Image (spheres, rainbow, N blue to C red):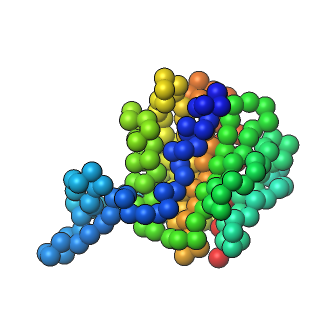
Amino acid sequence: MTQFLYFLIISLFIFPGLSYSQDIRATTKDGREVLLKKDGTWKFYSGSKSSLASKSILYKRSNKATRVFNTKGDKFAVWYDPSKWTQQKLDSSSKITFNYKDGDLYGMVLAERISMDPDALKEMAISNALEVAPNTEVTLEENRVVNGKIVLCMRLVGTIKGAQFIYYGYYYTGKEGTIQVLTYTSQNLYPEYESEMMEFLNGLTINN
């Protein structure tokens, strides 16, 4: 993956200061909830597809994930395998990046102390991707139990400047704040790196 594409993809997922140029929820006079889109359109708000994750599969941190990155306030931590991943210099108060040592695979952690509606977090992530890659599709969306906490898992596929990419991430928002743990690579390399992406994502732990 070229450095140009690397920085383009990073730009997709930076929190826009959590300002509400994003979609917002509102209530009509008759009590119905609607979602007001930032493009001026609206739709009735249907709520979460599912409030519970399937407990048939429990996702846990790998025993090889022995190094930890703690976010500000220590509410969130991401454990990773130092023999595979190198942590990059922290370039803002909320974003840190990781490089996979043996190829074109990247990770990112974005955390905020502010909590938000879970559906708003999902819509924000998708909207940010669509702004840069209009053909972005969500190919996976499900709730998972990760180290004892329910998180949203999404996989996005899109094209930026002719380069196809896959973005695989976990999202969580609650009283602890908001966090996105992301991995991404080119679409042709995804089959090779899928298990490594999963292992990195499963390092997310949430402290009460």
The image quadrant where one finds the N terminus is top right
Q: Identify the residue shown where x is 40% and y is 41%.
A: 130
In the shown orientation, is residue 34 left or right of residue 191? left
Residue 36: horizontal and vertical position, in percent?
26, 60
Q: Identify the residue shown where x is 45% and y is 59%.
A: 121
Q: Identify the residue shown where x is 52% and y is 66%.
A: 173
Give above or below for 150 relative to 200.
below
The image quadrant where one finds the C terminus is bottom right
Q: Identify the residue shown where x is 30% and y is 55%.
A: 38
Is any part of residue 145 visible from this angle? no
Residue 97: horizontal and vertical position, in percent?
69, 48
Give above or below for 115 relative to 159.
below
Is any part of residue 68 visible from this angle? yes
In-front residue for pair 75/15: 15
In-front residue for pair 47/38: 38
Residue 19: horizontal and vertical position, in percent?
43, 63
**Total count of labels:** 0
